[in-house]
Image (cartoon, grey):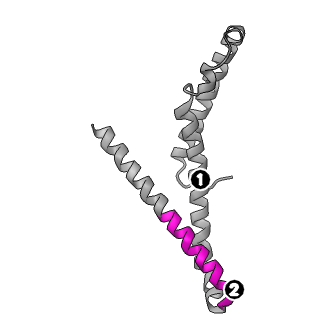
């Protein structure tokens, strides 16, 4: 049950973060539309603290996007519908090669996932 509670908490946080990101996007969009007509607003939006905040947010979002891509790859390995839909002849012909490639892909994706989890302050490429 503890895992269910943990996953519920994570799900609630994801919904909250998604909502916050949408609100931030809306507010930045409104500010960008008003800035050309308001020189003071334009100056404050182009200030160093605001630009640094945007860069930090951008970096965190880029890192999360990369992490989520790898996470989804690792969690869905072996459960993709294409694997079950292959013709039987093709499966028999290359079963050993595919098995080796699937194991290698799963291992490399797991290593990349672990790398991203452990590298909290890593900047994306």
Up-down: is 43 above or below 109? below
Name the residue located 43 percent from the left edge and 55 percent from the top edge.
15
Q: Is residue 124 magenta?
A: no
The picture places residue 74, in percent across and down from the top left corner, at 55, 34
Q: Quadrant of residue 103?
A: top right
- The N terminus - image quarter: top left
**Outermost residue toward the left in this view:** 1
Q: Which residues are magenta?
A: 20-38
The picture places residue 45, in percent across and down from the top left corner, at 62, 81
> Which label belongs to residue 36?
2
Question: Along the line of sight, which residue is nearer the eye, 12 or 52?
Answer: 12
The picture places residue 63, in percent across and down from the top left corner, at 59, 53
Give the side of residue 83 with respect to residue 89, left or right. left
Q: Secondary structure at mark 1?
A: helix
State whether the magenta stretch is mostly helix, strand or loop. helix
The picture places residue 23, in percent across and down from the top left corner, at 50, 68
Up-down: is 48 above or below 88? below
Q: How many marks?
A: 2
Up-down: is 30 above or below 17? below
Q: Quadrant of residue 84?
A: top right
Q: Which residue is mark 1?
A: 63
Question: Along the line of sight, which residue is nearer the eye, 112 or 26?
Answer: 26
Q: Is residue 28 magenta?
A: yes
Question: Along the line of sight, which residue is nearer the eye, 99 or 114?
Answer: 99
Instruction: Note whether residue 7 is visible.
Output: yes
Give the side of residue 17 with respect to residue 59, left or right. left
Name the residue located 51 percent from the left edge and 45 percent from the top edge.
118
User: Which dot, 1 or 2, sits closer to the camera?
Assistant: 2
Name the residue located 65 percent from the left edge and 80 percent from the top edge.
33
């Amino acid at each position: 049950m503890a895992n269910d509670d943990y996953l519920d908490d994570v799900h609630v946080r994801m919904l909250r973060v998604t909502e916050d990101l949408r609100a931030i996007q809306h507010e930045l969009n409104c500010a960008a539309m008003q800035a050309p007509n308001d020189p003071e607003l334009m100056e404050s939006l182009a200030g160093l603290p605001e630009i640094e905040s945007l860069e930090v947010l951008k970096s965190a979002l880029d890192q999360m996007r990369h992490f989520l891509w790898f996470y989804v790859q690792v969690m869905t390995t072996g459960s993709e519908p294409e694997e079950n839909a292959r013709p039987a002849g093709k499966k028999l012909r290359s079963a050993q090669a595919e098995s080796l490639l699937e194991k290698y892909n799963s291992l490399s994706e797991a290593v990349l996932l672990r790398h991203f989890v452990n590298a909290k302050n890593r900047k994306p490429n």
